[in-house]
Image (cartoon, helix red, strand yellow):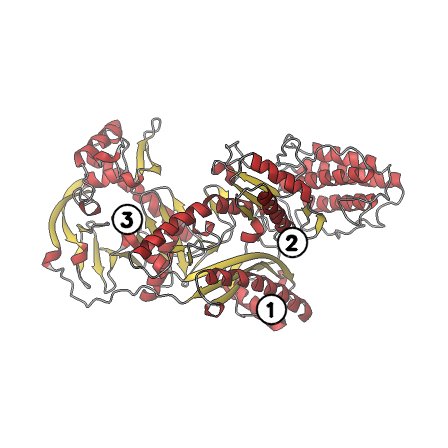
Amino acid sequence: MAVIDGTGQLRNDSARITELIATDLSASVPDCPGWTLRDLVVHLGGVHRWVIDAVLTAAPPQRARATDPVEGGAPEAPDELARWFGDGAIALANSLDRVGPDAPTWTPFPIESPHAEFWLRRQTHETALHRWDGEGAVGAGAGEVAAVGVEKPAAQPRTAGLLVVIGLPPVGHGDVGAHLGLTPRRYQSGETDVQGRIVIPLREEEVRQATRELVEAGAQAVVICLLQSHKNETSEQRARDIVREELQRLKSDIPVFASVDYYPSRKESHRMNTTILEAYGAEPSRQTLKKVSDRFKKHGAKFDLRVMATHGGTISWKAKELARTIVSGPIGGVIGSKLLGEYLGDENIACSDIGGTSFDVALITKGSFAIKSDPDMARLVLSLPLVAMDSVGAGAGSFVRLDPYSKSIKLGPDSAGYRVGTCWPESGLDTVSVSDCHVVLGYLNPQNFLGGAIKLDVQRARDHIKAQIADPLGLSVEDAAAGVIELLDLTLSEYLRANISAKGYNPAEFTCFSYGGAGPVHTYGYTEGVGFKDVVVPAWAAGFSAFGCACADFEYRYDKSVDLGVAQFASDAQKAAACTTLQAAWEELAVKVIDEFVINGFKPEDVMLIPGYKMQYMGQLNDLEIVSPVSTAANAADWDKIVDSFEATYGRVYASSARSPELGFSITGAILRGMVVTQKPVLPEDADAGPTPPQEAFLGTRPFYRHKKWVEAALWKMESLKAGNHITGPAIIESDATTFVVPDGFETTIDKHRLFHLKEVK
């Protein structure tokens, strides 16, 4: 079927429903238990009128969404009812045409910046579905059900949920399956409404037939995702069980993943994408991690391997959900920065991580980092709690190219990665990278890259820079290379400054931590002039993300969508009812959390449970994560504490004057974290050796190019420097894993924790 364009399908299906009114209004509707055809028509006619108000006013409709939504109720006589229904449908279609799909609107759902296209899609879908229902009630030919933006395979039953095939050739679908080179197939069998009520029961035989087709097609895994299953999981769980039964009968051992078992949250596309990732990568990742863990134990380790998770804790390789490990490295750096900040007494930290491919930025404010609940990664929306970070595709390995038209230098986003650049003769590369510029300018020691494991060829890098950058721009090789470094530093500096200022903060209130293998090389460049309170470079910057993983708690976190709306001056009974719902969600999540720790040999009593919630003022689009001030929620007093904690956090994040309790309070999600006590790294406490570095730390000098001239930079061995040592630029501090550049106009001091503090010399 074709994707619907405009309101044509809505008008056509409404007209067909109007024709049905002349048949038998008392006929029961099999797919809508308890409804007659008249009930269906009145319901849909009322919905159409209710939506018109939302479309035209972009505000919550004033009329109630009731069975008889118009004054005096819907007409009794069939001809008058037909006219009433047709008038409402035409008015809705005309309203949608008038405002256009991009007009802002209101919806009762937590959608960021909703537009009228939402109502076009939803009402076309609902009208088409109820046309099908009505035709089924009177025995008319049903034909195909159409839905805006939804493709339905030929000769397949109508759709409500998703069974996604994994492992077939790509066909260009715009979801996670396409990004992973997979082909989704969609089937439909049943329907649950937004309140969690089962409107159309699961058609079990259709599920069995779909399973047989998937096996015949060579599926490697099955993902089941039904609309609204986060409100009522029974249909999705039953579909899961049926699929497993059928697979067992077919003697097929392909795994089955039900989204509600993993990520029971609203926004079905987010939930589906994340479950597909789980199906696609969980078991291969698990097998790899198991091999690493077994190798550790073979060499005497007495621990199970743990992996950094997206929420900022570590989880075992045995965890049921391994999609949570999708961005382990950069998150480790944020956790390590938080621990260092506690040691240094810094509550506000700008975390900056430069590797070979990207520059990752995260902010810690008041000792806490933010969590994104539905992050966008590689253009895919997911349903995972993720430490909030921003990234730009520029790092030490980024390729450098000259735009043939503007003659401007372009950095990345692709990268040489482990191959470093053309300076490594065995790399097989012929495109200049940022690392080539480092070598040519004297930043890096070509004989000590990775402790001398890789030997770099300076002349080879010069030749490539000359041919690709310098000669086309009429520059010397040195000026071309320096221009690349300055452009990168400026890009990173502006990106870092914008991330702080755009959130309403002042860089002068922040300490900047610079780490990653390439961080210390560029620290001076992207922090110069920003005005940070302090700039810190750990001596172990190259392994800082691994350090952060060791700093993280052994912690599992599970989330569940809930929908609670309570007015400012609600009764105690209403507040207690909200607490009951929230507590039930916590108890459900607690079972999942404790089960994870039991898999790793812990007892339930070993686990410390920390409840939390996501809350917003009613009508707002964005919520805040709050650690619950109460361990259990049972009564009105508990609700008041929950609200007070939210308002205090809202005032800290935004402003006290921005608080709007008169709107009422809405809890959108329940959170439960569980952790057990683990050993954390202990920072060194070296004795102060004074400002003068020891003689054994001095390695000589090396020419260093900056500001259109060569200077002799003092070389120092990082591992030999002592606490209290003070170094003034131009200097280069080398280790086997990284290089810390201190140019003219800068100085650095190493403290007792082996942290370098970089300052501009005024």
Camera-side residue of 458 and 224: 224
Q: Quadrant of residue 392?
A: top left
> What is the distance, in whole Å, between disc 3 and disc 1 at their CAs?
48 Å
- Give the mark nearest the N terminus, 2 or 3: 2
Say what amino acid the circle numbered 2 marks: Asn
Is residue 232 rendered to the left or right of residue 165?
right
The mark closer to the camera, 1 or 2, is 2
- The residue shown at (11%, 48%) is 701
Q: Secondary structure at mark 1?
A: helix
In depth, the one of 60 and 375 nearer the eye is 375
Judging by the rendered image, the residue that carries numbered circle 3 is: 517
Q: Residue at x 26, y 39 (%)?
A: 420
Question: Where's the C terminus, which quadrant?
Answer: bottom left
Q: In the image, what residue type sits under mark 3?
A: Gly
SS of the residue at dot 3? loop
Q: Which residue is mark 2?
A: 232
Where residue 738 sits: x, y (%)? 24, 49
Outermost residue on the bottom side: it is 637
Residue 447: x and y in percent read 16, 43
Disc count in the image?
Answer: 3
Q: Which residue is mark 1?
A: 639
Within-10-Å neighbours for mark 2: few <14, some 14–19, many 20+: many
Above or below — where is 418 with respect to 735?
above
**Res. 345 visible in picture:** no
Give yes or no for contact between labels 2 and 3 (Cβ–Cβ under 8 Å). no
Depth check, mark 2 against mark 3: the one in front is: 2
In the foreground, 59 or 608: 608
- Give, as a three-letter code, the residue at label 1: Trp
| Marks 3 and 1, the one that precedes in the sequence | 3
